[in-house]
Image (cartoon, rainbow, N blue to C red):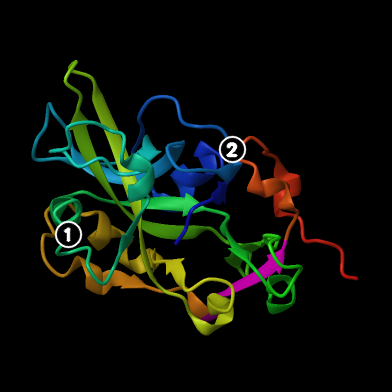
């Protein structure tokens, strides 16, 4: 799964990279330890209310952890941070969003936790510590993670827009750390992926970043949700 990630690019850079037309409201600040139910920055395309025939590309804030439109409440959002590509088209929670509500979630990189064989063989009864790893593109560029978003209205009439990240089996480059990884969308496929009128074949646009990724161990400070800052993505000194 992808359960924690970093996203520090500012709105100006994201507007330039993703050719955004509008920035919709205040966006979350740079974060290096984004956790489930946190607000995240997303790129979407929606038709304008005053001009339904015109589709606009926007930067928006979404809450990470998808709440299906038919949910009675939002309490299960933390369990819906990821959608498996193998079943996303079949699951009732995701299939409607896959058809018309797809997004891109820009990230610097993401974290996974790994227990080594040595640590796992520690003293009996003691839980072995997990080592966090930071996984990012080898060229330092942004990951355009493939996401879905959904609108949900509470019984009190308040609207919540939430999202999930589509994942797949991890490639060999990072598969030894965790067996899942986020899927991404190449720049030449962004238009098609975001197009709300494209209702078939969207999954064919996705890919696993694979060999384009590298991982290194980082401080266990990232394991606490309340910790944040660029120091969390710094590699641990080599011993």
Magenta-colored stretch includes residue 74: no
Between 127 and 86, the one lying in front of the other is 127
Magenta residues (range): 211-217
Q: Position of residue 173 (x, y in %)?
A: 57, 80
Question: Does residue 91 appear anywhere in the picture?
Answer: yes
Between 97 and 70, the one lying in front of the other is 70
- What is the distance, in whole Å, between disc 2 and disc 1 at their CAs? 32 Å
* Identity of the residue drawn at 19% across and 51% down: 93
Question: Does residue 20 appear anywhere in the picture?
Answer: no
Q: Is residue 231 left or right of residue 204?
A: right
Between 170 and 155, the one lying in front of the other is 155
Q: Position of residue 8 (x, y in %)?
A: 59, 44
Q: Is residue 33 left or right of residue 189?
A: right
In the picture of the structure, the residue carrying the numbered disc 2 is 30
Identify the image quadrant of residue 115: bottom right
Q: Position of residue 130 (x, y in %)?
A: 67, 61
Mark 2 or mark 1: name the one nearer the start of the chain: 2
Judged by its main secondary structure, the magenta piece is strand
Q: Position of residue 187 (x, y in %)?
A: 39, 64
Closer to viewer: mark 2 or mark 1: 1
Tell which residue pokes out farthest to the bottom in this image: 172
């Amino acid at each position: 799964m992808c359960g924690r990630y970093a996203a520090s690019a500012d709105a100006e850079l994201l507007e330039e990279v993703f050719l955004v037309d509008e920035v919709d409201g205040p966006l979350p600040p740079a974060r290096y330890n984004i956790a489930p139910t946190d607000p995240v920055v997303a790129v979407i395309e929606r038709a304008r209310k005053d001009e339904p025939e015109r589709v606009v590309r926007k930067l928006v804030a979404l809450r990470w952890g998808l709440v299906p439109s038919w949910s009675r409440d939002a309490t299960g959002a933390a369990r819906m941070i990821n959608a498996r590509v193998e079943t996303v088209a079949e699951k009732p929670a995701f299939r409607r969003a896959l058809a018309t509500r797809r997004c891109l979630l820009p990230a610097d990189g993401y974290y996974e936790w790994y227990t080594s064989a040595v640590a796992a063989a520690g003293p009996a009864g003691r839980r072995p510590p997990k080592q966090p790893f930071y996984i990012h593109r080898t060229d330092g560029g942004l990951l355009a993670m493939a996401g879905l978003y959904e609108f949900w209205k509470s019984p009190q009439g308040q609207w919540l827009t939430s999202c999930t990240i589509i994942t797949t089996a991890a490639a060999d480059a990072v598969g030894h750390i965790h067996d899942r990884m986020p899927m991404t969308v190449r720049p030449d496929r962004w238009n098609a992926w975001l197009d709300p009128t494209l209702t078939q074949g969207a999954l064919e646009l996705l890919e696993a970043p694979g060999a384009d990724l590298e991982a290194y161990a980082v401080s266990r400070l990232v394991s606490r949700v309340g910790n944040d800052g660029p120091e969390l993505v710094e590699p641990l000194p080599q011993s």
